[in-house]
Image: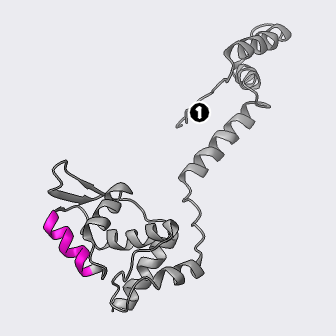
Amino acid sequence: MSRTAFPLVAQDLSAFARSLSRELDAHEGRPGHVQLLNMLTRSAGYRNYQHFRASCEAEERMERAPAPPEPVDHVKVERLARYFDAAGRLTRWPGKASHRLPCLWVLWSRMEAGRTHAEAEVNALLDASHLFGDPALLRRYLVDEGMVSRTTDCREYRRIERRPPAEAAALIRRLGRREH
């Protein structure tokens, strides 16, 4: 028979000890295993051991369950797509900060994962991905937003693997369909 260990946490050790002492004083003789489990878990704030166990099992199920998908504002994605031309190039730098980040995610997605890029390669990639002629601005924002790391001498760049927010992922998918 396999046993699952459940961590018992008492927020206030002094209150736990007082409660357990009262439980033991009220009990005649030496408590059995199940009685002692019930006393311990009641002292920690649960109704009984079964309540404690059910709570731990539910918490484990919730931790294993995938997170619910983030809602996507498709109107915003449609608005963001207007910053890109038919070839998927960024036509202008968004004035709104809330529009910049999803556009940066599109550029991030075009960098090869798990590979170190020279500054010249990053510039070439960014030049091919935008029309307003400022790869330095884009590089700086990618680094500042934690999407790309670079060496202190700025010679090597590497994409940082993260999951894009839902709206950025929707924009990447939309532009991917547009390019093909």
Q: In this view, does 4 lie above or below 69?
A: above
- Give the residue type at disc 1: Phe
Counting from the top left corner in percent of width and height, residue 122 is at 20, 68
Counting from the top left corner in percent of width and height, residue 6 is at 59, 33
**Disc 1 marks which residue?**
6
Q: In this view, does 167 lie above or below 8?
A: below
Quick one: quadrant of the N terminus?
A: top right
Name which residue lies at 60% across and 51% down.
Answer: 62
Q: Is residue 46 above or below residue 169?
A: above
Are there few (<14), some (14-19), or many (20+) residues within 10 Å of tag 1?
few
Name which residue lies at 43% across and 65% down.
Answer: 164
Counting from the top left corner in percent of width and height, residue 101 is at 44, 66
Counting from the top left corner in percent of width and height, residue 116 is at 17, 60
**Quadrant in the rendering for residue 104:** bottom left
Name which residue lies at 72% across and 26% down.
Answer: 41
Q: In this view, does 2 lie above or below 63?
A: above
Name which residue lies at 33% across and 68% down.
Answer: 108
Tell me: 8 left or right of 30. left
Magenta span includes 58: no
Tell me: 54 left or right of 76. right
**Secondary structure mostly taken by the magenta-highlighted segment of the chain:** helix
Say which of 8 and 97 sits in front.
Answer: 97
User: Where does the magenta region start and end?
Assistant: 119-128
